[in-house]
Image: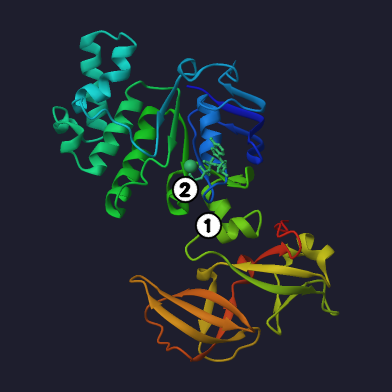
Amino acid sequence: MAEIRLENVWKVFGKVVAVKDVSLTIEDGEFLVLLGPSGCGKTTTLRCIAGLERVDGGRIFIGDRDVTELPPGKRGIGMVFQSYAVFPHMRVFDNIAFGLKMQRVPRSEIKRRVQAAAELLHIEDLLQRYPAQLSGGQRQRVAVARAIVLEPEVLLMDEPLSNLDALIRLQVRAELKRLHKQIGSTTVYVTHDQVEALSLGDRIAVMKDGEIVQVDDPTTVYENPADVFVGGFIGNPPMNFLPGEIAAPKKDGFLVLRAAGHEIPLPEEFVPALQDHVGKPVTVGIRAEHIEVVPEPTEGALPAQVLVVEPLGSHLLLTLEVGGETLKVMVDTDLRVEPNAEVWLRFDPAKIRFMDRETGKALLP
Ligand SMILES: Nc1ncnc2c1ncn2[C@@H]1O[C@H](COP(=O)(O)OP(=O)(O)OP(=O)(O)O)[C@@H](O)[C@H]1O
Ligand SMILES: [Mg+2]
């Protein structure tokens, strides 16, 4: 198996900079998800790694080999693409066996490896069918089997689940995760679905306008987004943002947050990150599940008005207005609230995140 290393990679199409000075190391055996909105350069980055695009700058390494100038066939990679091209005129067995036949692997070994790949993906009963006789999800699994049967050092997948319905997507997603544990290929997985990214990735690289804005494990990306863009892209609902200001009260060394005309005392651990921002405007980020709704006014609670109540089964999603701003709050289903009700909000101070109001960048300790 092999590590993948991108060093200052650029790809330009005319006036569009699709990949802008991307440097990234994907560890041996790691499952890395490239996540970002449409057009941010995910597919192009993947195609550069695969050798389907020539880079306009920078170098790409797989293991110890500089593959920048190598054609796709010499890079030791397997690929699964969004439009899962399976050969319609071949039975499932022959579709999966195709790459092995090209490599002139002996027949008995082909049989054994196709069988093993099919079992991993639970399609062993479908080997004699033609693709037209399969459901979309089964066809998708054939495409994945065809890539993994080659036991590639590197597996590249571009939105492989995007054509599946929600339920099959969940199933195949879990299968992919299990599969990765079993075969251990260094995997780069492209998606614009943030839930998929959180569920699959050892790490997530978030892209925007051709650049990587954050690379971290899913929990860190969710809890400590590098900027307003990441916080607003990841999570359902996205992170809430409010304008605020940091103030230093006279009597002790702690800081308070002024937001929506109220003051929230902040825990001591925020002092190093925020002391240079006293008196300056910040953007306050808080997740929907870190806001508590209380029916009575209490100290430090922000008054809010309920706009919308959405039952989501396991939770209620409230849309509230606070000092002219709209917030989303996740609460237990046993909370009885009606639209137009007045409520009070308490932020869990340890979960509040601060961004520079001008740059949008997180102010991290
Ligand atoms: N062959 C091409 N010629 C010209 N422009 C291209 C080409 N391929 C991609 N682009 C442009 O490069 C940018 C990045 O495209 P890319 O396909 O990498 O985005 P993406 O992140 O995969 O988006 P999506 O989620 O929609 O698949 C886009 O602005 C796109 O229009
Ligand atoms: Mg794409």
Among numbered discs 2 and 1, the one appearing first in the sequence: 2
Element marked by disc 1:
loop
Q: Which amino acid type is shown beneath numbered disc 2?
A: Ala
| Image side of residue 148 versus residue 233, left or right | left
Mark 1 near ligand 1 (CB under 8 Å)? no
Q: Look at mark 1 in the image and give the residue it sits on.
A: 234
Q: Position of residue 63 (x, y in %)?
A: 55, 20
Element marked by disc 2:
helix
Q: Look at mark 2 in the image and give the residue it sits on.
A: 197
- Residue 357 visible (yes or no): yes
Residue positioned 32% across, 48% down in the render:
169
Q: What is the quadrant of residue 362 in the picture?
A: bottom right
Q: Is residue 299 above or below residue 256?
A: below
Residue positioned 31% across, 15% down in the render:
100
Q: Position of residue 261 (x, y in %)?
A: 71, 85
- Tag 2 and tag 1, C-beta contact below 8 Å: yes
Question: Which corner quadrant of the figure contains ligand 1?
Answer: top right
| Image side of residue 317 versus residue 324, left or right | left
**Residue 10 versus residue 25: which sits nearer the camera?**
10
